[in-house]
Protein backbone atom coordinates (compact mmCIF):
# COMPACT_ATOMS: atom_id res chain seq x y z
CA UNK A 1 0.00 0.00 0.00
CA UNK A 2 1.30 3.46 -0.92
CA UNK A 3 2.51 5.83 1.74
CA UNK A 4 0.44 8.97 2.27
CA UNK A 5 0.72 12.30 4.05
CA UNK A 6 -2.23 13.16 6.31
CA UNK A 7 -2.89 16.24 8.38
CA UNK A 8 -4.58 17.32 11.58
CA UNK A 9 -5.54 20.96 12.14
CA UNK A 10 -5.99 21.64 15.86
CA UNK A 11 -8.66 24.31 16.14
CA UNK A 12 -8.17 27.69 17.89
CA UNK A 13 -10.69 26.86 20.62
CA UNK A 14 -9.01 23.52 21.32
CA UNK A 15 -5.60 25.20 21.61
CA UNK A 16 -6.98 27.97 23.81
CA UNK A 17 -8.43 25.35 26.16
CA UNK A 18 -4.98 23.66 26.40
CA UNK A 19 -6.24 20.38 24.95
CA UNK A 20 -3.36 20.21 22.48
CA UNK A 21 -1.30 17.67 24.42
CA UNK A 22 -4.17 15.24 24.85
CA UNK A 23 -4.96 15.36 21.17
CA UNK A 24 -1.35 14.82 20.09
CA UNK A 25 -1.15 11.89 22.51
CA UNK A 26 -4.19 10.26 20.88
CA UNK A 27 -2.81 10.37 17.35
CA UNK A 28 0.65 9.22 18.37
CA UNK A 29 -0.58 6.34 20.52
CA UNK A 30 -3.47 5.12 18.37
CA UNK A 31 -1.86 5.01 14.93
CA UNK A 32 1.32 3.46 13.55
CA UNK A 33 2.06 6.62 11.56
CA UNK A 34 5.18 8.78 11.69
CA UNK A 35 4.69 12.24 13.19
CA UNK A 36 6.89 14.19 10.77
CA UNK A 37 6.12 17.92 11.02
CA UNK A 38 4.27 20.55 13.00
CA UNK A 39 3.74 24.29 12.63
CA UNK A 40 1.73 26.99 14.35
CA UNK A 41 -0.32 29.18 12.03
CA UNK A 42 -2.08 32.49 12.42
CA UNK A 43 -4.22 32.28 9.27
CA UNK A 44 -5.09 35.50 7.50
CA UNK A 45 -8.61 36.13 6.19
CA UNK A 46 -7.59 35.12 2.67
CA UNK A 47 -6.41 31.67 3.77
CA UNK A 48 -9.51 31.17 5.93
CA UNK A 49 -11.86 32.01 3.07
CA UNK A 50 -10.04 29.76 0.61
CA UNK A 51 -10.06 26.82 3.00
CA UNK A 52 -13.74 27.35 3.82
CA UNK A 53 -14.47 27.48 0.08
CA UNK A 54 -12.79 24.08 -0.37
CA UNK A 55 -15.00 22.57 2.31
CA UNK A 56 -18.12 24.31 1.00
CA UNK A 57 -17.48 22.94 -2.49
CA UNK A 58 -17.75 19.43 -1.03
CA UNK A 59 -21.03 20.38 0.65
CA UNK A 60 -22.40 21.73 -2.63
CA UNK A 61 -21.33 18.65 -4.56
CA UNK A 62 -22.52 16.04 -2.08
CA UNK A 63 -25.23 17.77 -0.10
CA UNK A 64 -23.29 17.05 3.09
CA UNK A 65 -24.74 18.99 6.01
CA UNK A 66 -21.61 18.27 8.05
CA UNK A 67 -19.37 19.84 5.38
CA UNK A 68 -21.60 22.91 5.35
CA UNK A 69 -21.30 23.19 9.13
CA UNK A 70 -17.51 22.87 8.96
CA UNK A 71 -17.25 25.53 6.24
CA UNK A 72 -19.24 27.95 8.41
CA UNK A 73 -17.16 26.96 11.43
CA UNK A 74 -13.89 27.74 9.61
CA UNK A 75 -15.14 31.18 8.56
CA UNK A 76 -16.22 32.02 12.09
CA UNK A 77 -13.54 30.36 14.25
CA UNK A 78 -10.37 30.51 12.13
CA UNK A 79 -10.66 34.13 10.95
CA UNK A 80 -8.77 37.00 12.61
CA UNK A 81 -10.59 38.86 15.36
CA UNK A 82 -12.87 41.32 13.53
CA UNK A 83 -12.31 44.06 16.14
CA UNK A 84 -8.54 43.91 16.58
CA UNK A 85 -7.34 42.07 13.48
CA UNK A 86 -5.21 39.80 15.70
CA UNK A 87 -5.03 36.28 14.35
CA UNK A 88 -5.99 33.00 16.00
CA UNK A 89 -3.64 30.11 16.69
CA UNK A 90 -4.08 26.98 14.56
CA UNK A 91 -1.65 24.07 14.85
CA UNK A 92 -0.99 21.90 11.81
CA UNK A 93 0.39 18.39 12.35
CA UNK A 94 1.59 16.08 9.57
CA UNK A 95 1.57 12.28 9.78
CA UNK A 96 3.16 9.99 7.20
CA UNK A 97 2.69 6.31 6.52
CA UNK A 98 0.67 3.64 4.78
CA UNK A 99 -3.04 4.47 4.49
CA UNK A 100 -2.40 7.58 6.59
CA UNK A 101 -5.52 9.53 5.59
CA UNK A 102 -7.92 6.77 6.59
CA UNK A 103 -6.10 6.07 9.87
CA UNK A 104 -6.18 9.72 10.91
CA UNK A 105 -9.85 9.94 9.91
CA UNK A 106 -10.77 6.93 12.06
CA UNK A 107 -8.96 8.18 15.16
CA UNK A 108 -10.58 11.60 14.69
CA UNK A 109 -14.17 10.35 14.48
CA UNK A 110 -17.38 11.94 13.27
CA UNK A 111 -17.96 15.67 13.65
CA UNK A 112 -21.51 14.81 14.74
CA UNK A 113 -20.27 12.58 17.58
CA UNK A 114 -22.03 9.42 16.48
CA UNK A 115 -20.21 7.20 18.96
CA UNK A 116 -20.43 9.41 22.04
CA UNK A 117 -18.18 7.12 24.06
CA UNK A 118 -14.86 8.94 24.14
CA UNK A 119 -13.46 6.44 21.67
CA UNK A 120 -12.35 9.10 19.18
CA UNK A 121 -10.69 12.52 19.43
CA UNK A 122 -13.96 14.30 18.69
CA UNK A 123 -15.95 12.17 21.12
CA UNK A 124 -13.62 13.40 23.87
CA UNK A 125 -12.79 16.95 22.82
CA UNK A 126 -15.60 17.99 20.48
CA UNK A 127 -19.22 19.08 20.92
CA UNK A 128 -22.30 18.74 18.74
CA UNK A 129 -25.48 19.96 20.39
CA UNK A 130 -28.89 20.06 18.73
CA UNK A 131 -32.33 21.09 19.99
CA UNK A 132 -35.65 19.21 19.88
CA UNK A 133 -36.07 20.11 16.21
CA UNK A 134 -32.60 18.71 15.44
CA UNK A 135 -31.22 22.18 14.75
CA UNK A 136 -27.56 22.66 15.63
CA UNK A 137 -27.14 24.92 18.67
CA UNK A 138 -23.43 24.43 19.26
CA UNK A 139 -20.72 22.89 17.12
CA UNK A 140 -17.05 22.43 18.03
CA UNK A 141 -15.25 19.69 16.05
CA UNK A 142 -11.97 20.02 18.04
CA UNK A 143 -9.81 19.26 14.98
CA UNK A 144 -10.20 19.31 11.22
CA UNK A 145 -8.93 16.47 9.01
CA UNK A 146 -9.57 15.17 5.51
CA UNK A 147 -11.64 12.03 4.78
CA UNK A 148 -10.05 11.29 1.41
CA UNK A 149 -6.61 11.47 -0.16
CA UNK A 150 -7.84 13.98 -2.75
CA UNK A 151 -9.17 16.35 -0.11
CA UNK A 152 -6.02 15.93 2.01
CA UNK A 153 -3.87 16.88 -0.97
CA UNK A 154 -6.00 19.95 -1.82
CA UNK A 155 -6.05 21.22 1.76
CA UNK A 156 -2.35 20.66 2.31
CA UNK A 157 -1.36 22.40 -0.92
CA UNK A 158 -3.37 25.41 0.26
CA UNK A 159 -1.91 25.52 3.77
CA UNK A 160 1.61 24.94 2.44
CA UNK A 161 1.17 27.95 0.16
CA UNK A 162 0.75 30.15 3.26
CA UNK A 163 3.12 28.29 5.59
CA UNK A 164 5.95 30.82 5.26
CA UNK A 165 3.79 33.94 5.59
CA UNK A 166 1.13 32.82 8.08
CA UNK A 167 3.17 30.35 10.17
CA UNK A 168 5.94 30.56 12.73
CA UNK A 169 5.94 32.21 16.16
CA UNK A 170 2.44 33.52 16.89
CA UNK A 171 3.26 35.82 19.80
CA UNK A 172 0.71 38.41 18.66
CA UNK A 173 -2.24 35.99 18.48
CA UNK A 174 -5.57 37.08 19.87
CA UNK A 175 -5.38 34.98 23.06
CA UNK A 176 -1.68 35.52 23.86
CA UNK A 177 -0.66 37.94 26.62
CA UNK A 178 1.07 41.16 25.61
CA UNK A 179 3.27 43.50 27.62
CA UNK A 180 6.78 44.02 28.93
CA UNK A 181 6.54 41.25 31.55
CA UNK A 182 5.76 38.58 28.96
CA UNK A 183 8.56 36.08 28.24
CA UNK A 184 9.14 33.40 25.64
CA UNK A 185 10.82 30.16 26.59
CA UNK A 186 11.79 27.08 24.63
CA UNK A 187 10.92 23.52 25.58
CA UNK A 188 12.62 20.72 23.69
CA UNK A 189 11.09 17.26 24.06
CA UNK A 190 14.12 14.99 23.82
CA UNK A 191 14.69 11.86 21.69
CA UNK A 192 13.78 9.47 24.52
CA UNK A 193 10.14 10.47 23.90
CA UNK A 194 10.28 9.34 20.28
CA UNK A 195 12.19 6.06 20.43
CA UNK A 196 8.87 4.29 19.93
CA UNK A 197 5.34 5.52 19.24
CA UNK A 198 3.56 6.45 22.44
CA UNK A 199 1.43 9.09 24.13
CA UNK A 200 4.45 10.46 26.02
CA UNK A 201 5.06 13.64 23.98
CA UNK A 202 1.41 14.63 24.22
CA UNK A 203 1.24 13.75 27.91
CA UNK A 204 4.22 16.00 28.64
CA UNK A 205 2.58 18.87 26.75
CA UNK A 206 -0.61 18.23 28.70
CA UNK A 207 1.30 18.41 31.99
CA UNK A 208 2.96 21.68 30.94
CA UNK A 209 -0.47 23.19 30.23
CA UNK A 210 -0.90 23.69 33.99
CA UNK A 211 1.54 26.61 33.61
CA UNK A 212 -1.26 28.68 32.08
CA UNK A 213 1.15 29.71 29.31
CA UNK A 214 0.36 29.73 25.59
CA UNK A 215 2.13 27.66 22.96
CA UNK A 216 3.05 30.11 20.21
CA UNK A 217 5.33 27.95 18.04
CA UNK A 218 6.02 24.28 17.41
CA UNK A 219 8.51 22.41 15.24
CA UNK A 220 9.31 18.72 14.78
CA UNK A 221 13.00 18.36 14.00
CA UNK A 222 16.08 16.19 13.91
CA UNK A 223 19.00 18.23 15.22
CA UNK A 224 22.21 18.31 13.24
CA UNK A 225 25.44 17.70 15.11
CA UNK A 226 26.46 21.29 14.37
CA UNK A 227 23.23 22.57 15.93
CA UNK A 228 23.64 20.36 18.99
CA UNK A 229 27.23 21.49 19.48
CA UNK A 230 26.17 25.14 19.44
CA UNK A 231 23.02 24.50 21.47
CA UNK A 232 24.87 22.72 24.29
CA UNK A 233 28.13 24.69 24.10
CA UNK A 234 27.56 26.41 27.49
CA UNK A 235 27.33 23.00 29.16
CA UNK A 236 31.07 22.39 28.76
CA UNK A 237 32.04 25.00 31.36
CA UNK A 238 29.36 23.70 33.73
CA UNK A 239 30.63 20.14 33.39
CA UNK A 240 34.26 21.17 33.92
CA UNK A 241 33.29 23.03 37.10
CA UNK A 242 31.18 20.10 38.25
CA UNK A 243 34.22 17.82 37.96
CA UNK A 244 36.02 19.88 40.60
CA UNK A 245 33.34 18.90 43.11
CA UNK A 246 34.21 15.22 42.98
CA UNK A 247 37.27 14.80 40.75
CA UNK A 248 39.92 16.08 43.14
CA UNK A 249 38.99 13.72 45.97
CA UNK A 250 38.54 10.72 43.71
CA UNK A 251 41.80 11.37 41.83
CA UNK A 252 43.76 11.76 45.07
CA UNK A 253 42.27 8.53 46.42
CA UNK A 254 42.97 6.58 43.22
CA UNK A 255 46.58 7.77 43.02
CA UNK A 256 47.16 7.01 46.68
CA UNK A 257 45.95 3.44 46.18
CA UNK A 258 47.94 3.01 42.99
CA UNK A 259 51.28 4.28 44.30
CA UNK A 260 50.99 3.16 47.89
CA UNK A 261 51.60 6.55 49.52
CA UNK A 262 49.28 9.44 50.40
CA UNK A 263 48.70 11.90 47.55
CA UNK A 264 47.33 15.18 48.96
CA UNK A 265 44.51 16.87 47.07
CA UNK A 266 46.34 20.19 46.95
CA UNK A 267 49.04 18.52 44.83
CA UNK A 268 46.56 17.80 42.05
CA UNK A 269 45.09 21.23 41.33
CA UNK A 270 46.52 21.66 37.82
CA UNK A 271 46.00 17.97 37.01
CA UNK A 272 42.32 18.17 37.90
CA UNK A 273 41.92 21.30 35.79
CA UNK A 274 43.08 19.27 32.80
CA UNK A 275 41.02 16.25 33.81
CA UNK A 276 37.98 18.50 34.19
CA UNK A 277 38.31 19.63 30.58
CA UNK A 278 38.64 16.01 29.42
CA UNK A 279 35.63 15.00 31.52
CA UNK A 280 33.58 17.89 30.11
CA UNK A 281 34.50 16.97 26.53
CA UNK A 282 33.63 13.29 27.04
CA UNK A 283 30.25 14.17 28.58
CA UNK A 284 29.59 16.76 25.89
CA UNK A 285 30.18 14.14 23.20
CA UNK A 286 27.66 11.83 24.87
CA UNK A 287 25.07 14.60 25.07
CA UNK A 288 25.43 15.42 21.38
CA UNK A 289 25.23 11.73 20.48
CA UNK A 290 22.06 11.34 22.54
CA UNK A 291 20.45 14.32 20.81
CA UNK A 292 21.57 13.53 17.25
CA UNK A 293 22.75 9.91 17.05
CA UNK A 294 26.39 10.78 16.37
CA UNK A 295 29.43 11.98 18.36
CA UNK A 296 31.07 15.15 16.99
CA UNK A 297 34.49 13.46 16.95
CA UNK A 298 33.11 10.75 14.66
CA UNK A 299 31.59 13.14 12.09
CA UNK A 300 33.13 14.91 9.12
CA UNK A 301 32.36 18.64 8.71
CA UNK A 302 29.78 17.78 6.04
CA UNK A 303 28.13 15.14 8.22
CA UNK A 304 27.79 17.65 11.04
CA UNK A 305 25.50 19.74 8.84
CA UNK A 306 23.11 16.91 7.92
CA UNK A 307 20.05 16.06 10.00
CA UNK A 308 20.65 13.53 12.74
CA UNK A 309 18.80 10.30 13.32
CA UNK A 310 17.06 11.34 16.56
CA UNK A 311 13.72 13.18 16.74
CA UNK A 312 12.83 16.15 18.95
CA UNK A 313 9.82 18.42 19.30
CA UNK A 314 10.39 22.10 19.99
CA UNK A 315 7.67 24.21 21.60
CA UNK A 316 7.78 27.92 22.39
CA UNK A 317 5.72 28.99 25.41
CA UNK A 318 4.69 32.60 25.92
CA UNK A 319 3.46 34.40 29.01
CA UNK A 320 4.33 36.18 32.24
CA UNK A 321 7.23 34.53 34.11
CA UNK A 322 7.34 31.80 31.47
CA UNK A 323 10.92 30.64 32.13
CA UNK A 324 10.41 29.97 35.85
CA UNK A 325 6.99 28.37 35.40
CA UNK A 326 8.21 25.86 32.83
CA UNK A 327 11.40 24.97 34.69
CA UNK A 328 9.40 24.41 37.88
CA UNK A 329 7.09 22.00 36.07
CA UNK A 330 10.05 20.15 34.54
CA UNK A 331 11.85 19.72 37.85
CA UNK A 332 15.61 19.30 38.53
CA UNK A 333 17.91 17.86 35.87
CA UNK A 334 18.26 14.66 37.92
CA UNK A 335 14.83 12.93 37.78
CA UNK A 336 15.51 11.16 41.10
CA UNK A 337 15.55 14.57 42.81
CA UNK A 338 12.41 15.87 41.07
CA UNK A 339 9.06 16.17 42.81
CA UNK A 340 6.24 13.71 42.06
CA UNK A 341 4.11 15.02 39.23
CA UNK A 342 6.96 16.92 37.56
CA UNK A 343 7.87 16.10 33.97
CA UNK A 344 11.28 14.68 34.77
CA UNK A 345 10.09 12.60 37.72
CA UNK A 346 7.26 11.14 35.62
CA UNK A 347 9.11 10.65 32.34
CA UNK A 348 12.88 10.94 32.98
CA UNK A 349 15.40 8.16 33.59
CA UNK A 350 18.68 9.91 34.45
CA UNK A 351 20.44 13.26 34.18
CA UNK A 352 20.80 12.96 30.41
CA UNK A 353 17.69 10.96 29.53
CA UNK A 354 15.36 13.32 31.38
CA UNK A 355 12.51 13.88 28.90
CA UNK A 356 12.85 17.60 28.16
CA UNK A 357 15.07 20.66 28.06
CA UNK A 358 13.87 24.14 29.01
CA UNK A 359 15.61 27.47 28.58
CA UNK A 360 17.05 28.99 31.77
CA UNK A 361 16.53 32.62 30.75
CA UNK A 362 14.71 34.67 28.10
CA UNK A 363 18.08 35.47 26.50
CA UNK A 364 19.01 31.81 26.25
CA UNK A 365 15.54 31.04 24.88
CA UNK A 366 16.20 33.47 22.03
CA UNK A 367 19.63 31.94 21.42
CA UNK A 368 18.26 28.39 21.39
CA UNK A 369 15.31 29.25 19.14
CA UNK A 370 17.74 30.79 16.67
CA UNK A 371 19.98 27.72 16.66
CA UNK A 372 17.19 25.24 15.89
CA UNK A 373 15.48 27.74 13.53
CA UNK A 374 12.14 27.42 15.24
CA UNK A 375 10.44 29.64 12.63
CA UNK A 376 11.61 27.44 9.74
CA UNK A 377 8.80 26.06 7.58
CA UNK A 378 8.99 22.27 7.45
CA UNK A 379 5.43 21.86 6.18
CA UNK A 380 5.86 22.91 2.55
CA UNK A 381 8.73 20.48 1.75
CA UNK A 382 6.67 17.51 2.99
CA UNK A 383 3.60 18.59 1.04
CA UNK A 384 5.60 19.14 -2.14
CA UNK A 385 7.20 15.71 -1.75
CA UNK A 386 3.83 13.95 -1.62
CA UNK A 387 1.39 16.21 -3.48
CA UNK A 388 3.37 18.75 -5.47
CA UNK A 389 3.41 22.52 -5.08
Image (tube, rainbow, N blue to C red):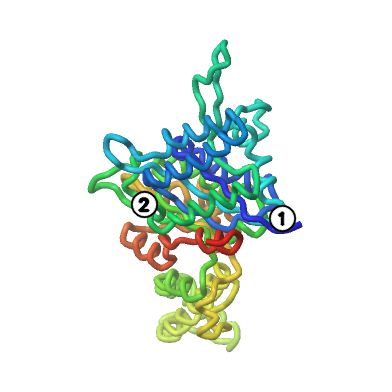
Say whether residue 253 is left or right of residue 316: right
Q: CA distance from mark 1 to mark 2?
A: 40 Å
Few, some or many residues within 10 Å of mark 2 (<14, 14–19, 20+): many
Few, some or many residues within 10 Å of mark 1 (<14, 14–19, 20+): some
Considering only vertical position in the picture, is 277 above or below 239?
Answer: below
Residue 273: give x, y in percent of width and height. Answer: 42, 82
Residue at figure coordinates x 66%, y 56% from the top left: 4
The secondary element bearing badge 2 is classed as helix
The disc label shown at residue 323, or none: 2
**Dot 1 or dot 2, earlier in sequence:** 1
Instruction: Work out which residue is located at the far top of the displayed protein and give it.
Output: 132
Q: Are marks 1 and 2 in contact (CB under 8 Å)?
A: no
Instruction: Looking at the picture, tell me which residue is in the foreground, 380 or 339.
Output: 380
Q: Is residue 206 visible?
A: no
Residue at figure coordinates x 45%, y 45% from the top left: 50
Residue 382: give x, y in percent of width and height. Answer: 56, 61
Residue at figure coordinates x 53%, y 78% from the top left: 282
Residue 15: give x, y in percent of width and height. Answer: 46, 40
Instruction: Looking at the picture, tell me which residue is in the foreground, 314 or 88.
Output: 88
Say whether residue 159 is left or right of residue 33: left
Q: Is residue 286 visible?
A: yes
Say whether residue 259 is left or right of residue 210: right
Amino acid sequence: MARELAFVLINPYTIAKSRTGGIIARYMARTDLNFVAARMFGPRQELVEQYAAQVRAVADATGSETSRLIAEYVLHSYAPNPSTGRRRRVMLLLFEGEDAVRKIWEVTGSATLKLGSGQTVRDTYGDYIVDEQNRVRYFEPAVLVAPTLERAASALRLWAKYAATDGGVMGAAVDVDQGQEVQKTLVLLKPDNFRFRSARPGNIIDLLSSSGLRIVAVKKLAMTVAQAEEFYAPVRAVLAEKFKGFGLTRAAGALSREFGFPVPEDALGSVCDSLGLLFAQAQFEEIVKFMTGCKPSECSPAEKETHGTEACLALVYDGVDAVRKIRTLLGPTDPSKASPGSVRREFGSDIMVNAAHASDSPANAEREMRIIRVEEDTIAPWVEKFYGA
